[in-house]
């Protein structure tokens, strides 16, 4: 009989925000923003730039645009400005990005020159200042993880063109429009180099497609000390194959969760369920999975529980 018995653990807007891709006529899909372009450089970079600031840095950039109504351009960029060590600029479509609204976005000014894999995070607001009554200034805020496929982000329908171009409204005075951008750059985690074991003492489970529900259940069961101990005490043999034995596969999984330095795969366990790749992409009911799993384990655990330990039904 082979028994795995490791040491116990020490710690038990109604607005749709989109990239500025020039919109085609007709309704747009709602699955999410569509990418503009991919910047493919020979040089590589971390998924998150390593020089992200330690403390949030913020700045307001005012942009005064004269002769606004006489501009004959589809889109217009502001001068670049720097916040948190990064270069930004505001992008507007004075006549709308194929809509009857002013379209306005925050853009990474030097995205075409950044190394492959760059990414940065910012919280920001964009505003059209009301030059008559400041309280009527239109300001909208959001946040975004900028990268090569989405190097700009903002509001396609920021404000109605009829309101913007009406002098009596106060947004255009002496044919001048004032735009403000408030940008806050925050440090974010570089998930490519993040060491979960070092930072938390724990590692996670790899997702096979749609197995997040199962991963949550397994992590929950793992963190019940008595259940974990019972799993380790289930009798298995050296001839058992993890992909064909649920008890051994679960023992192996718990052991790796306890001692591995990186995330743990669940393929042996799902194979022991008799699942194939198709099953891994199906969203099963987590309560039903818990019931079936416990039924499969009950007989194996009875030996240990019947020898004076808590009853299995009481545990679960």
Image: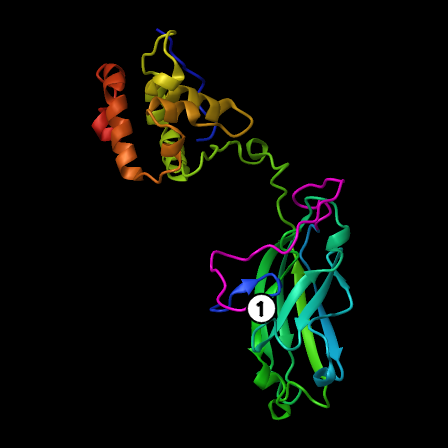
Please identify the quarter of the rendering in which residue 66 is found. Answer: bottom right
Q: Does residue 248 show up?
A: no
Position above or below: 87 against 165: above
Magenta span: predominant SS is loop
Q: Residue at x 59, y 32 (%)?
A: 198
- Position of 223 with respect to 134 (left or right) is left
Identify which residue is drawn at 67% across, 51% down. 148
Q: Which residue is mark 1?
A: 155
Label 1 environment density (alpha carbons within 10 Å; few <14, some 14–19, many ≥20): many
Judge by depth and name the residue closer to the eye, 36 or 262: 36
Q: Quadrant of the C terminus?
A: top left
**Hey, which residue is sitting farthest bottom in the picture?**
168
The residues colored magenta run: 24-52
Seen from the viewer's position, the closer of residues 189 and 309 is 189
Residue drawn at x 29%, y 34% is 289
Q: Is residue 51 magenta?
A: yes
Rendered position, 263 above or below 24: above
Image-quadrant location for residue 5:
top left
- Relative to 251, 54 lies left or right: right
Q: Is residue 31 magenta?
A: yes
Where does residue 106 sit, x and y in percent of width and height? Answer: 66, 64
Seen in the picture, residue 85 relative to 293 is either above or below; the reply is: below
Provide residue 71's location: percent of width, then percent of height. 73, 80
Residue 213 image-quadrant placement: top left
Is 78 positioned to the left or the right of 24 in the image? right
């Amino acid at each position: 009989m082979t028994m795995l018995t490791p040491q116990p653990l020490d710690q038990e807007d109604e607005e749709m925000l989109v990239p500025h891709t020039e919109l085609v006529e007709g309704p747009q899909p709602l699955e999410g923003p569509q990418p503009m372009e991919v910047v493919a450089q020979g040089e590589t970079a971390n998924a998150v730039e390593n020089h992200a600031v330690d403390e949030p840095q913020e700045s307001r950039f005012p942009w005064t645009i004269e002769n606004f109504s006489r501009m004959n351009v589809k889109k217009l960029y502001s001068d670049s400005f720097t916040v948190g060590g990064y270069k930004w600029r505001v992008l507007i479509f004075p006549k709308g990005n194929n809509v009857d609204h002013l379209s306005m976005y925050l853009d990474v000014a030097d995205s075409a020159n950044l190394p492959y894999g760059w990414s940065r995070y910012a919280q920001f607001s964009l505003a059209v200042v009301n030059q008559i009554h400041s309280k009527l200034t239109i300001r909208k805020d959001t946040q975004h993880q900028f990268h090569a496929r989405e190097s700009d982000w903002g509001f396609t329908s920021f404000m109605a063109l009829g309101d913007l171009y009406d002098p009596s409204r106060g947004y255009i005075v002496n044919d001048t429009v004032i735009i403000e951008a408030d940008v806050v750059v925050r440090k974010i985690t570089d998930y490519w180099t993040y060491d979960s074991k070092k930072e938390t003492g724990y590692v996670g489970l790899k997702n096979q497609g749609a197995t997040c529900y199962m991963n949550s259940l397994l992590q929950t069961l793992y963190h019940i000390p008595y259940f974990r101990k019972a799993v380790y005490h289930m009798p298995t043999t050296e001839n058992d194959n993890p992909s064909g034995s649920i008890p051994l596969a679960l023992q192996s999984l718990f052991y790796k969760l306890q001692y591995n330095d990186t995330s743990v795969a669940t393929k042996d366990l799902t194979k022991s369920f008799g699942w194939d790749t198709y099953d891994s992409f199906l969203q099963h009911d987590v309560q039903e999975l818990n019931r079936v799993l416990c039924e499969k384990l009950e007989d194996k655990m009875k030996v240990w529980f019947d020898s004076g330990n808590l009853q299995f039904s009481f545990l679960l």
